[in-house]
Amino acid sequence: MELPLYNQNAENIGTVELADNVFGLPMNQDLLYQVVTSQMSNKRQVLAHAKGRGEVRGGGKKPWRQKGTGRARHGSIRSPIWRGGGVTGGPTKERNFKKDINKKMMQKALKVALSSKVRDGQLFVLDALTIEKPKTKEMAVVMKKFVSVIGRLNNILLVMPTDTTAIYKSARNLPYLDTIEARNLNPLVLLEANRVILSKESLALIEKQWGTAKSK
């Protein structure tokens, strides 16, 4: 399988060969669903927490004596049936939404997501990207040149081989562009992106890391 190879000026300078066992897998929606939902669950932060009667401040003294008042007996004004008391059955911070996912499932889901981007014409290969100093303006100029190739600048994922500080700082202020190292690539970030720009060096790293074992 071949894709066009572009330089930093969005000029077609040739083609690049893609490994079929990484970029040529058929769609597997069930696998992607399992992996992506597990990733979203693992990212979820438990923020909601309702205090129980033991956590609400005050209420240590018995409101009135047990007998002889004609009123119902109570041991604390922080009981759930009192206004200002604790909550019964409310959300707590002890909830755990973590989901374990098999390593082989995660790897195959990544390759299925990459293959899906190739089939849909949403993956583009860049020969190299060189930015000497962290300048948002320079990155914006490069992206504008790619409008004729990738279309509208919206939700673009730029995959680089290493954490290049100049490129990262140049891209972080562009609302339509995200950067990620090739080794940190995962199905969730791939599927969230409308377009994926993959450097040639990142392509080699991906094929080396995930293309050794032939997929069934």
Image (cartoon, rainbow, N blue to C red):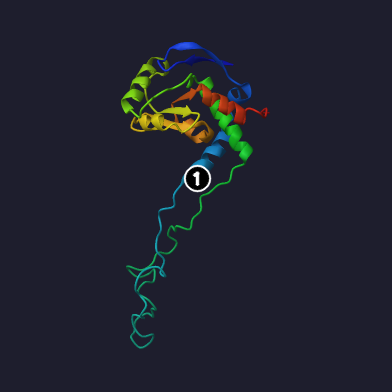
What's the residue at 61%, 28% (across, down)? 208
Can you say which quadrant of the picture contains the N terminus?
top right
Position in image of residue 102 (x %, y %): 62, 41
What's the residue at 57%, 28% (across, down)? 206
Can you say which quadrant of the picture contains the C terminus?
top right
Indicate the quadrant where residue 56 lies.
bottom left
Q: Which residue is disc 1 drawn over? A: 41
Q: What secondary structure is found at the residue carrying circle 1?
A: helix
Whether 83 is drawn above or below 130: the answer is below
Whether 138 is drawn above or below 183: the answer is above
Position in image of residue 199 (x %, y %): 49, 23
Q: Nearer the viewer, residue 116 or 179?
A: 179
Position in image of residue 203 (x %, y %): 54, 24
The residue type indicated by label 1 comes to Ser
What's the residue at 50%, 15% (across, down)? 5
Whether 20 is drawn above or below 108: the answer is above
Look at the image and tell me whether residue 97 can be seen.
yes
* Crowd around label 1: few <14 · some 14–19 · many ≥20 (10 Å): some
Position in image of residue 16 (x %, y %): 55, 16
Whether 59 is drawn above or below 9: the answer is below
Query: Farthest bottom residue?
Result: 68
Look at the image and tell me whether residue 30 can be seen.
no
Q: Nearer the viewer, residue 8 or 191?
A: 8
Q: Is residue 151 left or right of residue 184?
A: left
Indicate the quadrant where residue 86 lies.
bottom left
What's the residue at 43%, 64% (across, down)? 88
